[in-house]
Amino acid sequence: MDPRLRAAVDASVGWYEDLCTLHGVGSTLVDGLWSALSPPPPLHSDAVVVEPAVDAGLVRARLQGREHCGVKDSFATMDLTGDGMRLLFAATWIHRAARPAGRRDLPAGWAAVTGADELAAWTGQHDTSDVLLPPLLQRAHFRILARRSGDRIVAGAVARLGSGAVDVSNVYAVPGHRVDWAELAEVADACFPGRPLVGYERGDALAAALDGGFEPVGELRVWVR
């Protein structure tokens, strides 16, 4: 497997572990399939494929009895329509090679969110109020990042340091603004220097990420029932 894809998938699993822990949800990783032991946090799948050898039969067995659930097929190899699921979206894993380590300042306008009120303003614009909770602000490997114009948050992202890579996710901008992904990469570098950056995007956000120096390294699909 391309090690860049491996890093991106593993970072995604780490994110799920952290968010489930935050919400008091247990999990298991057996036979290359991660799954939550009870309903996961909002906007998260019940199961994540971690190894390409996982097939639809294993997914079906693991999620048996769950009327409503989601699956992140990290390698886009499955067709789960026969299991009563529909494709929610397809996306592309992305990677940007590490830059030389060194102390860097955050680009102008960007800063880490530090307080609950500011986090509420951030999540309120991104529909993640019930997902990204204040205790994340006290986790050393998380940075919830905001770009301001005056007193207003106009863009945001989350950078999470995992095992050797930084997962860049939850990237958004309010209407009338856009995220410069080359600048966002500088922000992530300033937070966690010397690491490769990974994530996944689709549509216009994917195009912006590729324009900003990221490379596509694989495909994924998210299914829901």
Image (cartoon, rainbow, N blue to C red):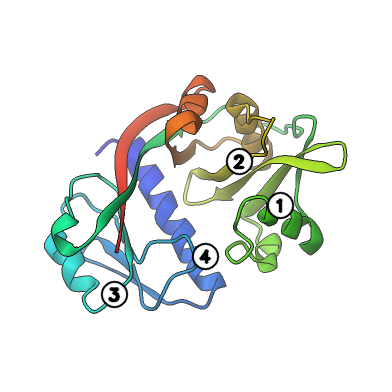
Q: What distance separates the C-alpha of mark 1 from that of mark 2?
A: 10 Å
Q: Is residue 98 above or below residue 9?
A: above
Whichever of labels 4 and 2 marks the residue nearer the N terminus, that label is 4
- Please tell me whether mark 3 sits on a helix, a strand or a loop: loop
Answer few, some or many: residues within 10 Å of disc 4's Cα (few below 14, many 20 plus, some between 14 and 19). Answer: some
Whichever of labels 4 and 3 marks the residue nearer the N terminus, that label is 4
The residue identified by callout 2 is 172
Q: Is residue 83 above or below residue 168?
A: below
Disc 1 and disc 3 in contact, CB within 8 angstroms: no
Q: Is residue 109 visible?
A: yes
Residue 212, percent across and down? 54, 23
Residue at 67% x, 55% y is 123
The quarter of the picture where residue 178 lies is top right
> Does residue 170 appear left or right of residue 116 in this picture?
left
Answer few, some or many: residues within 10 Å of disc 3's Cα (few below 14, many 20 plus, some between 14 and 19). Answer: few
Q: What distance separates the C-alpha of mark 3 from that of mark 2?
A: 31 Å
Q: What distance separates the C-alpha of mark 4 from that of mark 2?
A: 19 Å
Choose between 21 and 189: the one closer to the eye. Answer: 21
> Does residue 136 appear left or right of residue 29 in this picture?
right
Question: Which residue type carries mark 2?
Answer: Tyr
Q: What distance separates the C-alpha of mark 1 from that of mark 4?
A: 17 Å
The residue identified by callout 1 is 122
Disc on res. 67: 3
Answer few, some or many: residues within 10 Å of disc 1's Cα (few below 14, many 20 plus, some between 14 and 19). Answer: many
Whichever of labels 1 and 4 marks the residue nearer the N terminus, that label is 4
The residue identified by callout 4 is 19
Question: Which residue type carries mark 1?
Answer: Trp
Whichever of labels 1 and 2 marks the residue nearer the N terminus, that label is 1
- Please tell me whether mark 4 sits on a helix, a strand or a loop: helix
Q: How many marks?
A: 4
The quarter of the picture where residue 68 lies is bottom left
